């Protein structure tokens, strides 16, 4: 349902950090997170520890149309923080903004693989 508690998120991120070598066999790893919660030093620390374990992390800037530095993990200093643009490359009205954003990328009306069968797709945003 899109909700969760910080302690569960931190536990999951920490588990990946501790088990990355076993999971990947030493191969490069990437984590992509679309989380949006008020700024939390605990969440940001867990994300930075994940990056220090050798995992590249990209995070969504958030969908509140406000300063991304007020949210986690967008406010963490190490991950690549991505804001959303529209089809015409303008900032999406819902996308967060500010100094914590590293790059903007398409985020509205994105055609993605569906789960029904090999031919299905869904249009997502945010």
Image: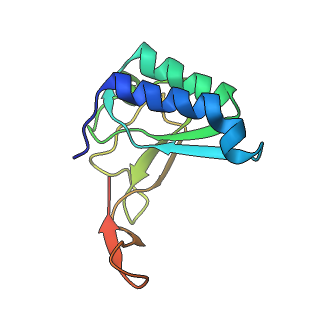
| Colouring rule applied to residues | rainbow
**Camera sees residue 73:** no
Q: Residue 85 placed where, x, y %? A: 40, 54
As drawn, which residue projects farthest toward the front?
22
Q: Is residue 124 above or below residue 12?
A: below
As drawn, which residue projects farthest toward the bottom?
119
Q: Residue at x 33, y 34 (%)?
A: 36
| Total tally of numbered discs in the picture | 0
Q: Depth check: give the residue in front, 35 or 8.
A: 8
Name the image quarter holding residue 7.
Answer: top left
Q: Residue at x 32, y 72 (%)?
A: 122
Q: Depth check: give the residue in front, 106 or 56.
A: 56
Q: Residue at x 34, y 24 (%)?
A: 6
Q: In this view, does 41 lie to the left or right of 116?
A: right
Q: Residue 14 placed where, x, y %? A: 53, 26
Q: Residue 35 placed where, x, y %? A: 37, 37
**Camera sees residue 60:** yes
As drawn, which residue projects farthest toward the top?
41
Name the image quarter holding residue 106.
Answer: bottom left
Q: Which residue is drawn at 66% across and 44% down?
A: 23
As drawn, which residue projects farthest toward the left?
1
Q: Is residue 99 above or below residue 89?
A: above
Name the image quarter holding residue 102.
Answer: top right
Q: Residue 43 placed where, x, y %? A: 44, 22
Q: Depth check: give the residue in front, 74 or 56.
A: 56
Q: In this view, does 49 lie to the left or right of 116?
A: right
Q: Is residue 118 above or below residue 107?
A: below
């Amino acid at each position: 349902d899109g909700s969760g508690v910080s302690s569960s998120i931190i536990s999951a991120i920490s588990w990946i950090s501790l088990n990355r070598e076993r999971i990947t066999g030493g191969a490069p790893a990437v984590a992509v997170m679309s989380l949006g919660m008020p700024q939390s030093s605990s969440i940001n620390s867990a994300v930075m520890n994940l990056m220090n374990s050798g995992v590249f992390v990209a995070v969504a800037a958030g969908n509140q149309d406000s300063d991304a530095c007020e949210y986690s993990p967008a406010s963490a200093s190490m991950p690549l923080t991505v804001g959303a643009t529209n089809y015409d490359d303008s900032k999406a009205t819902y996308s967060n903004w500010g100094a914590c954003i590293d790059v903007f990328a398409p985020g509205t009306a994105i055609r993605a693989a569906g789960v029904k069968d090999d031919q299905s797709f869904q249009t997502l945003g945010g």
